Image (spheres, helix red, strand yellow):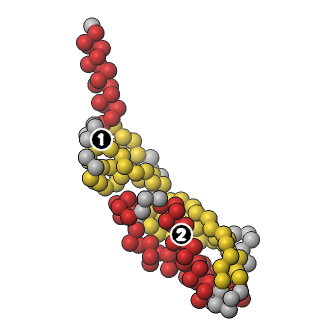
Amino acid sequence: MVPLIIILVIAVVVLSQAIKIVPSDQIYIRTRLGQPLGPMAPGLNFVAPFIDSIAARYQRTKTVNISGTFASSDNDNVAVELEARYSILDAAKTFQNIPDVDQAVRTLLETVVRNEAARRKGDDFRFERQSVEAEVMRAFNDAGAQFGVQLTEVTSGSRTKF
């Protein structure tokens, strides 16, 4: 009786390690013995117990906020508060290149906004809000493509003085 219980417990442990359920709004990166195999499909997935592991979990879409004061081309300080929604398009690239996705997106977004502010005069930056948002999105997506990340929406916050 005791050996049967031990075998049953081992079978339950192995089975629980072999089944992974990936929510539809997330991306899991599977590795086999430390080598990335790529993203898992949403839903029920079977993995090799104790050989495969989940190395990273990402939200498919996420929102990041930045706020700060940036210098324009005429040395005017422009207060900016942006909310940006981004998606992970290529989770394998993201996993290989970015250890902290939120921080990397925030840093890249701040750099793009800083560059855009430096290209424009302060009044132009303030009053051409839609073109600034479109240019920030375009520049971010050009740079973020190598990391598998893309902005899907950029909106200015309530305190932004575009």
Q: In which quadrant of the rendered image does the C terminus lie?
A: bottom right
Q: What's the mark number on residue 107?
A: 2
Measuring from the top left, give residue 34's x and y in whole percent: 28, 49
Query: Looking at the image, do the residues carrying marks 1 and 2 touch, with CB atoms under 8 Å apart?
Result: no
Q: In which quadrant of the rendered image does the N terminus lie?
A: top left
Q: Who's the residue at 30% across and 14% down the image?
A: 5
Distance Cα–Cα, label 1 vs label 2: 36 Å
- Circle 2: residue type: Thr
Q: Residues within 10 Å of mark 2 (few under 14, many from 20)?
A: few
Q: Is residue 102 visible?
A: yes
Q: Residues within 10 Å of mark 1 (few under 14, many from 20)?
A: some
- The total number of labels drawn is 2
Measuring from the top left, give residue 6's x and y in whole percent: 28, 16
Residue 98, quarter of the rendered image = bottom left
SS at mark 2 in the image:
helix
Mark 1 vs mark 2: which is more N-terminal?
1
Q: Who's the residue at 44% across and 46% down the image?
A: 23
Residue 97, quarter of the rendered image = bottom left
Q: Which one is nearer the viewer's eye here, 85 or 37?
A: 37
Give the residue pinned by disc 1: 46
Q: Who's the residue at 51% across and 72% down the image?
A: 108
